[in-house]
Image (tube, helix red, strand yellow):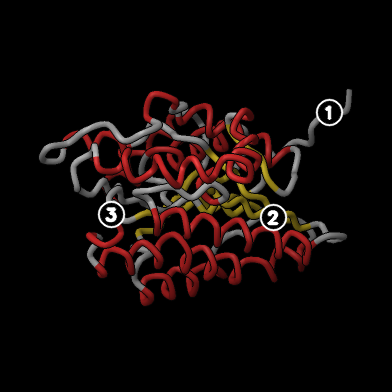
């Protein structure tokens, strides 16, 4: 059996590192000897995670950045040359909203696009040239199965993940033959603050799929596997690889049932 290459000594930048998947990926990579750069809005949480990593004898630093704001993204990108060359970029920052698109405030839709799409584009563009220059790099985009299986209630979120899928595929093909890899992790539901926020809202209720959600530890292990064994995409759990076939063969059923499922739930946002 071929031994997976060591990633000890590499440097990874992780967005959305203050909680959920991003936090767990940071901890797991640091445990493997990767120097991690934590990026998120909440400084108190970033400090706490940095301290936890250092207690575990790992190496970490952080940069406070609200990736929704263009000037904040520009400040982060201007700071990158001062850091160690970044080998791994994990585009994890993002949030979702559940409800009728017709009821979604435009400001919130715009914010979602800025965080889920524009920040990913900006950081990937900033780091790809350096990765090519120093002969190693891996961009991992944290996507979702709804990128290829759009559903009621998550119209803009689904669209953002479909964009991520298409972007990943295109840049993956551009980088073929080089030492730079680009991957997308197509996740099923993951137990994060998204579900908790929804239930705690006024007239809150469960969002479909919560019962099938996996742990952040499971999602993080998949990220580590992609780093060690690069490929264009990976569904997690693997059973969700059937969604492409389901959409093709049975999309007409979802067309009929989808509106009924959405009407049963209260109209509220579930934002991370």
Q: Secondary structure at mark 3?
A: loop
On screen, residue 165 above or below 107: above
Q: Residue tagged by mark 2? A: 182
On screen, residue 41 above or below 212: below
In the image, taking residue 131 as reference, residue 66 lies left or right, namely left
The residue sitting at 30% across, 59% down in the picture is 101
Residue furthest out toward the left: 202
Q: Position of residue 249 (x, y in %)?
A: 63, 41
Front-most of 145 and 53? 145
- Give the distance between the C-alpha atoms of the residues marked 1 and 2, in whole angstroms: 21 Å
Of the residues tagged 1 and 3, which is closer to the observer?
3
Q: Residue tagged by mark 1? A: 3
The residue sitting at 89% across, 22% down in the picture is 1
Q: Position of residue 185 (x, y in %)?
A: 60, 44
The residue sitting at 31% across, 51% down in the picture is 97
Of the residues tagged 3 and 2, which is closer to the observer?
3
Of the residues tagged 1 and 2, which is closer to the observer?
2
Q: Residue tagged by mark 3? A: 100
On screen, residue 23 above or below 132: above
């Amino acid at each position: 059996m071929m031994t997976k290459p060591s990633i000890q000594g590499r440097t990874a930048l992780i967005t959305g590192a203050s909680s959920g998947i991003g936090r767990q990926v940071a901890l797991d990579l640091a445990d493997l000897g990767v120097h991690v750069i934590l990026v998120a809005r909440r400084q108190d949480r970033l400090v706490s995670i940095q301290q936890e990593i250092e207690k575990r004898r790992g190496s970490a630093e952080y940069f406070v950045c609200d990736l929704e704001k263009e000037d904040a993204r520009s400040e982060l990108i201007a700071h990158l040359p001062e850091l160690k060359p970044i080998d791994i970029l994990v585009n994890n920052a993002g949030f979702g909203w559940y409800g009728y698109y017709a009821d979604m405030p435009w400001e919130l839709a715009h914010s979602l696009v800025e965080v889920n799409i524009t920040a990913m584009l900006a950081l990937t563009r900033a780091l790809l040239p350096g990765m090519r220059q120093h002969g190693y790099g891996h961009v991992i985009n944290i996507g979702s199965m709804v990128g290829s299986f759009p559903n009621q209630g998550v119209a803009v979120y689904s669209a953002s993940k479909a964009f991520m899928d298409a972007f990943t595929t295109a840049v993956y093909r551009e980088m073929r033959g080089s030492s730079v890899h680009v991957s997308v992790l197509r996740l099923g539901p993951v137990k994060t603050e998204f579900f908790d926020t929804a239930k705690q809202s006024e007239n809150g209720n469960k969002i479909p799929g919560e019962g099938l959600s996996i742990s952040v530890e499971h999602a993080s292990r998949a990220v580590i596997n992609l780093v060690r064994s690069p490929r264009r995409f990976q569904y997690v759990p693997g059973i969700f690889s059937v969604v492409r076939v389901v959409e093709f063969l049975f999309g007409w059923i979802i067309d009929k049932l989808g509106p009924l499922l959405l009407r049963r739930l209260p109209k509220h946002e579930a934002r991370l």
